[in-house]
Image (tube, helix red, strand yellow):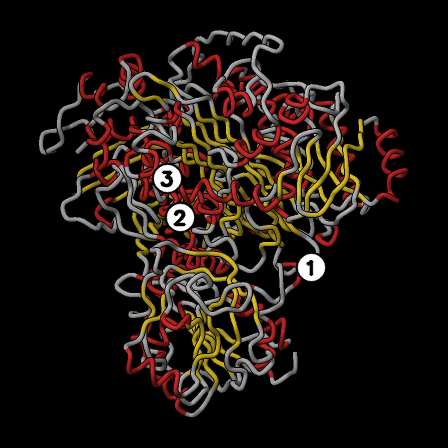
Amino acid sequence: MNAHDTRNNPEPLVDADLAADHGLSPDEYQKVLDLIGRTPSFTELGIFSAMWNEHCSYKSSKKWLKTLPTTGKRVVLGPGENAGVVDIDDGQVVVFKMESHNHPSFIEPYQGAATGIGGILRDVFTMGARPIAAMNALRFGAVDHPKTRHLVAGVVAGIGGYGNSFGVPNVGGEVNFHKRYNGNILVNAFAAGLADADKIFLSKPTGVGLPVVYLGAKTGRDGIHGATMASAEFDDSIEEKRPTVQVGDPFTEKCLLEACMELMASGAVIAIQDMGAAGLTCSAVEMGAKGNLGIRLDLDNVPCREDAMTAYEMMLSESQERMLMVLDPTLENQARAIFEKWDLDFAIVGETTDDLRFRVFRDGVEVADLPIKDLGDEAPEYDRPWTMPVPRPALEHNDFADTDIAASLLTLIGSPDLASRRWVWEQYDHLIQGNTIVRPGSDAAIVRIAGHEKKALAFSSDVTPRYCDADPFEGGKQAVAECWRNLTASGATPLAITDNLNFGNPEKPEIMGTFVRAIQGIGEACKILDFPVVSGNVSLYNETNNEAILPTPTIAGVGLISDLRKIVPSGFTNISDIVLLVGAPDTWGTHLGQSLYLREIHSREDGPPPPVDLEQEKQAGDLVRSLIADGLVNAVHDCSDGGLGVTLAEMAIQSGIGAAITPPQTLSPVAAFFGEDQGRYVMTARLEDRAELWDRCEKAGVAIEEIGSTIAGELKLGNADAIFVKELQERHEAWFPQFMNM
Amino acid sequence: MKTAILVFPGTNRERDAADAIESVSGIKPVIVWHQETEIPDVDLIILPGGFSFGDYLRVGAIAARSPIIDALHRKADTGVTVLGICNGFQILTETGLLPGSLIRNRDLDFICRDINLRVVNNSTRFSQSYALDQIIRFPVAHHDGNYFADAETLRMVEDNDQVVFRYCDPAGEINATGNPNGSVNNIAGMTNKAGNVMGLMPHPENLIDQLLGGIDGRALFESLLGRAA
């Protein structure tokens, strides 16, 4: 019986209305009809909806993603596989990616966030890399919104609940609040793993008639249409979408990791792919299409958690902790024994074929027979209309009252976006595996490579959404530059990034315009800073009731530290060191547009963001890295949110040591201390190294200015009252626990 | 010193423990899977941290019914040194090798941070390289580290000097401020009556290297090696 013969088939009849319910536009449905030359079966319609939704097909973003630089001398594998692969010397590679789980996390914060972690960890270990670090970039609504605390508590508990049990150190990330996320929070999860360069596993199989094996947890009815849900805007009916959220089981994931590592070592794996969005459908189609092979699946052999699941449900389930593998049949017994040891399912559910068809059987009935390559290759691709974002006018000079520097700093350092995130990261196991050299709360987290005394990796996740909203192009540049700067300040050589692009509805030209311009900014920064994109994820339709989130292209970067003993902390280290401001052309701050000072002190969110001079950025960063390597500086911290004043406060908070800073009398102290001019670092050095530092900066063409010296116990900014470091620490630590315990 | 590390599904700090043992003793431990029924001839058996069987049902409860546990009892009864860290401590209380139990943290959250401990008994084989009343810093990483025992059990534990480490504040005071999880009598680590089995919630294996922020954990393993710190 054929797929389109419905005489004995209980599936509903497919028509244009049912296709529309599956998120396919009339044009897209017509394309399906043209492609297969008949009306699809119900299961086939489900497969098309899974493959052609925005989340899986990148149909609105592909055109622009292709413009990003994805190659470099250390890039082993760029976008296209489960995660990017980058060379870190000694025959080792780091495998990493960041992915969003925004929509499910808003509907069900604990499970949504937990399965986001689970998914990204699987992307990494599917490739044969054991996860060694995780980060999370989280964005929540306004702190006074009634749902915010509930969402923060649920997301943090979900991330901790999954990652802690799985056993990966959660070493960094971001947490921000803004009212534009009230109806649509962002949960962007990053994971990195370590592998030998010659032991990377891919999803591309070779060979006909080979067994296709289902591994891991059983298939249930959870997460059906999850990817389709993630490809639509929210409205007030979102509570009804709770059943589309998957449920995570970190224990099974941990067992799956160990079983996969043993399986890969056994030599039985020809190709392997995790089941993520659109589950069995996406994994099987991708494997077949990549290998130029057909795939035949017999769903009767799929391990199910629930009775009487239909083909449609099985093909669209997003049950977690599952993998699909093409097996070397001569090693079937060894492979099966490994999964029996770990008490996980191991079921041969199909085979590779030479007909380039995706054929699915249930109860002996063929429920799908589709051209496998066309499912991916022929997916719609749109060149969506977009409009150029309108630049924000520059701030009028002096149109806001100057405020007391010390009082403003105390307010800023305890404000929601700058206060300590200790409450969050103390709920994450950030020490497991015993390699965490720099813990959360610094510029970049640093994780030692096990088995190497000196080698380590640095990780940082960055984006400033309010900059992106005001100017997506500069905001895109800034996100990449700040990530690069954070890695640099930690002493690492930046290697590559993964991008997680969170935007609103791309069918609106002004939203598409922010997306296009942000990508152009990211691309330019990646090119000039030699910081390629090796993996990523796009999350569109982040809107509720027509209000879009702030454009949020999260950039997560990885850097390599070749000698751990040379790194310096981000906090002050000694009393009586000289304090230096290095980098920007105008060393003291000038730019207050989009600053946190304006927002937190004057409740204003206007002006353009600070521009990033990428050439100057590169010169300054390369110099800073060499100064760290040569032992000429003993603390380095980059200037970002909140400007120089907040940078100095953070350096004091880290160590308990203070500083006395003297700006020139001619400058506005507000701009000097709270301007968010880019490309700057604060560092400290011994007085006796002064001449050499000036010499090095001059040779590199990088500005340097001595702005003060470190002192005991208090921070004194110009003529403002001195602030006790202890008070800064208390303000910094107080906000989050108070907020969560309100 | 020959060491065996017992691994259950969901155990996740076995590598940390193995690295610490290798770093201090120079000898790689053997890994023993929970379904085995014999433990090789070793000087030390470690039950490492993690979430055995997902910590579903009750922490440590399912692991305590694994096939390997009979062998563990036999070894412990003959005086072999047994160290349970975190989930290992939880499993040891479930097997009955240690009294009391570990319940959910007082504030209900998972906690990962450095805490201070006071060495209140340095005459055990686990603590002989520490000074009595020494204040040390270990990290904790647990959701269920709140030690609890009924009054009678607690009196016996205290009367027998079975408590080795107590949570304290940075000044060394044993008080509520320094107690991260609500453990009764600030108990962080304790032995059985015979003194050959210890359970502790903090992770000495994660603080044995100056690069990682401290070496206070090292002396525990050196104690077991019989070396002076």
Label 1: state its secondary structure: loop
* First-in-chain label (1 vs 3): 3
Q: Earlier in the sequence, mark 2 or mark 3?
A: 3
**Quarter holding the C terminus of chain A?**
top left
| Residue bearing mark 1 | A453
Q: Classify A294 as above or below A507.
A: below
- Determine contact: label 1, label 2, CB under 8 Å: no
Query: Image quadrant of residue B209?
Result: bottom right
Q: Return the mark for residue B170.
A: none
Subunit that carries the residue with mark 2: A
* Residue type at tag 2: Met
**Numbered mark located on residue A152 in the image:** 3
Q: Nearer the viewer, residue A76 or B118?
A: B118
Q: Which numbered disc flags the more N-terminal residue, 1 or 2?
A: 2
Of badges 2 and 3, the one in the foreground is 3
Q: Position of residue A527 (x, y in %)?
A: 66, 25
Q: CA distance from mark 2 to mark 3?
A: 37 Å
Tag nearer the camera, 1 or 3: 3
The answer to whether residue A204 is visible is no
Q: Residues within 10 Å of mark 3 (few under 14, many from 20)?
A: many
Within 10 angstroms of label 2, few (less than 14), some, or many (20 or more) residues?
Answer: many
Instruction: Tell me if residue B228 can be seen.
Output: yes
Is residue B87 rendered to the left or right of residue A7? right
Residues A742 and A249: in front is A742
Where residue A241 sits: x, y (%)? 23, 32
On residue A325, the disc is: 2
